[in-house]
Amino acid sequence: MALGDLRTRIESKQALLAVIGLGYVGLPVACEFARVGFDVLGVEQNAERVTRINTGDLPFNGVEPGLLELLLQVRSSGKFHATSSYAELNDRDIVLICVETPIDSEKIPQYHALRSTLSAMGPVLKPGSLVVVESTLSPGTITELVLPLLESSSGLKANLGFFLGICPERVMPGRLLSNLRNLSRVVGGLTPDTAETMRTLYRHITNAQLDATDCITAELVKTVENAYRDVQIAFANEVAWICEAVGGNVWQVRELVNKSPGRQMLYPGAGVGGHCTPKDPWLLAHSVKDRDVPVRLIPAARKVNDTMPAHLAWLVEDSLRRQGLDISEARILILGYAYLEDSDDPRNSPSETVREHLVMKGASVIIHDPYVPGYQGSIEELASGCDALVVAVKHSIYQTIDLAVIHSRMRTPILVDGRGFIDAERAAGAGFIYIGLGRGFSGSV
């Protein structure tokens, strides 16, 4: 099939779609294309997840506005179903790849899932089909890995037997559908004609701008935008340390700095988690690992952000010591385990690192999270006999907890806020000794 014919099928919604990987990215993408009228096949290797999806059950538990209703809608319409079989891809005109692309302990990209996907789909790839990678890749990966592996596994040639591009996702848990519909996208193709075909496709589900470009530019844009965010968070975290040392309040400083034109200081916090932000800067840096390019700022920012959980643990230890308590005898409740507010996504959880540091000091540590299985329960009951309450995630329900009741259950009323989330005066009014990240220690407000 020529690209012109494929564009005609896309415009009329007759093109058959497949989405490989039905996680936080792939499932909403599949549902959105099914919602607007495309026939969509979802391919997922986790059999339990396939069963849940096909019975209209979301495979994650966080607050995800509209997604469950959309899944039920597209399942009942017959426009979407999931499978674990790659063989069903043989009639698909378009294949979107949404698999994870992690890094190892040496910060080297690990493309096991991507390689496995390309090897499995190649033999059943329909001639003339369009393959689009939505996963985030180190710049150069499309031409250096994806292209040759797909040609080898399929026996087809790019731009003749199949067409290839990359359209990196721009979604966050808690805003999946909103981000898909309203954020601009970069569509990179091996050829300009491929990029334009991709733009025709994504125009069906995206209300924002679709910028057509080449693959290397699309790969760079995604990794650069996340590296930029990571660097900016590191700056905010370093300012928080300075404020603690000199007796300032980073939250007030940030607010006033941002009144100056051209300034937009981000929030400091107890750590940067998730699948993307801790990883994507390293994907960007990896693209020049064998070239004479001095990469200094990205590793420095990563180091700052990686130390924040340890710093929060130190704030807990220091606050206990100021009350005459040894951390080895303390019982501590951490609020939040997911990396992001109102999400159940625990990948690279800063709370886990905070716990490790506290346990290493001898503390007894409990964690509560309303969305992550294994950490749910009554906050009031978990707080019984605790010496410190640590806010690590800004889950909405933590804004409404009854601090007075929790105070009455605790052995020592220390509250350490790692997200600037709990009002200091409210905490003090409930009897807590409040310690906030980025605030000079006063033992009170």
Image (cartoon, grey):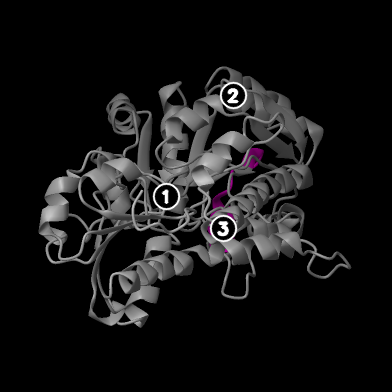
Report the number of numbered marks. Answer: 3
Magenta-drawn stretch contains 309? no
User: Which span is picked out in magenta?
Assistant: 115-131
The answer to whether marks 1 and 2 mark residues whose Cβ atoms lie closer than 8 Å is: no
How far apart in space, not on screen, are marks 1 and 3 (Cα)? 19 Å
As drawn, the label of residue 246 is 3
In front: 17, or 278? 278
Drawn side of residue 363 relative to residue 281, left or right:
left
Observer-side mark, 1 or 3, equals 3
Find residue 149 and report its image quarter. Answer: bottom right
**Outermost residue to the right:** 292
**Amino acid at pointer 3:** Val
Q: CA separation, marks 1 and 2?
A: 45 Å
At 35% from the left and 74% from the top, the residue drawn is 358
Residue, disc 2: 10
Secondary element type, mark 2: helix
- Look at the image and say whether residue 123 sits in the magenta stretch: yes
N-terminal-most mark, 1 or 3: 3
Relative to 63, is 441 above or below? below
Residue beneath disc 1: 419
Asked if residue 2 lies left or right of residue 423, the reply is: right
